[in-house]
Amino acid sequence: MGSGYLLSPLMLIINTLFDIYILLVLLRFLLQMLRADFYNPVSQFITKLTTPPLRILRRIIPSIGGQDSASIVLCLLLIYAKFLLMRALEIPAVHIGGVMAPIGGVSYAGLLVLSVADLVALVLTVFLGAIIIQVVISWISPGNYNPVIGLVNRLAEPILKPIRKFIPPLGGIDLTPLFASLFLLVVKMLIVPPIIFLGSF
C-alpha cells in the first residue's frame, strides 16, 4: 500500500471539516443579509458556532453597506487555508463548480482567485440546494412547518420571486423552481470557469 492509501481518507476528513464550517459561515452571512429569523433555533446554532472567529475579524474588518464583511473574509480565508493544506499534501488540482482547478502550480495570488471561484460556486450551490429542498418538502410534507423549512424558504425566495413575475403557474403547477434551478446552473457555468482561468496562472 502506497502513500495514497492514507491520503484519500485524510483528504475526505479535511474537505468535510473545512466545507461544513465554510458552509455555516456562508449561511450566517446569507441569512443575515436576507433578514431571516435570528431567533430560529437553526440560526442560533449557526451563530454560536461561527461567532468566535468572527468576533476577532470584526475588530479589523468593518461592515460594508450594512453587511457582515467579516463573514465573507472568513469564508475566503478558510477556503484559502484548505487549498494551502491540500497543496502541502501534494494534491495537484481540485473540483470547483464542476471544473478541475489546478492548485499545485499557481501563485499565492492565483490561489486566492481560485478561493473566490470556490466561494462563488458555493453561494450558487446554496441557493440551488435551497430550491431543491423546498420542492422536495412541498411534495412529501406540504403545509407543515419547522425551523429548517423557514430558513430554506428564506434562502430560496430571492431567486424564485423575480422569476414568478414572468412565469406564472401553468395548470396549477409551479414551474418556477425548474427555471430558477436552470438559471443558477447556467450562471455557475458562465461565471465560475472564467474566474478559475484567471487564477490558473
Image (cartoon, rainbow, N blue to C red):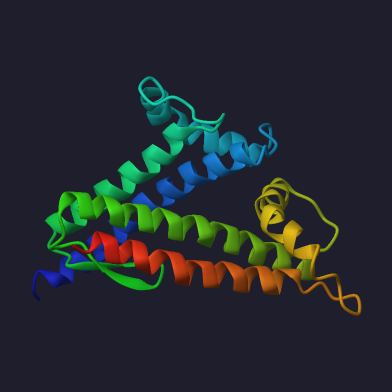
| Residue 109 percent coordinates (x, y) | 21, 49
Q: Would you place residue 104 above or below residue 79 in this image?
A: below
Q: Is residue 141 visible?
A: no
| Residue 152 percent coordinates (x, y) | 67, 53
Residue 168 left/right relative to 46: right
Residue at 23% x, 60% y is 10
Residue lying at the far top of the rendered structure? 59
Quadrant of the image containing the N terminus: bottom left
Residue at 41% x, 27% y is 52
Q: Nearer the viewer, residue 84 or 113?
A: 113
Question: Residue 57 is drawn in which quadrant?
Answer: top left
Q: Nearer the viewer, residue 18 or 113?
A: 113
Residue lying at the far right of the rendered structure? 171
Question: Residue 97 is drawn in which quadrant?
Answer: bottom left
| Residue 139 percent coordinates (x, y) | 78, 70
Quadrant of the image containing the C terminus: bottom left
Q: Nearer the viewer, residue 114 or 21?
A: 114
Q: Nearer the viewer, residue 199 or 145?
A: 199
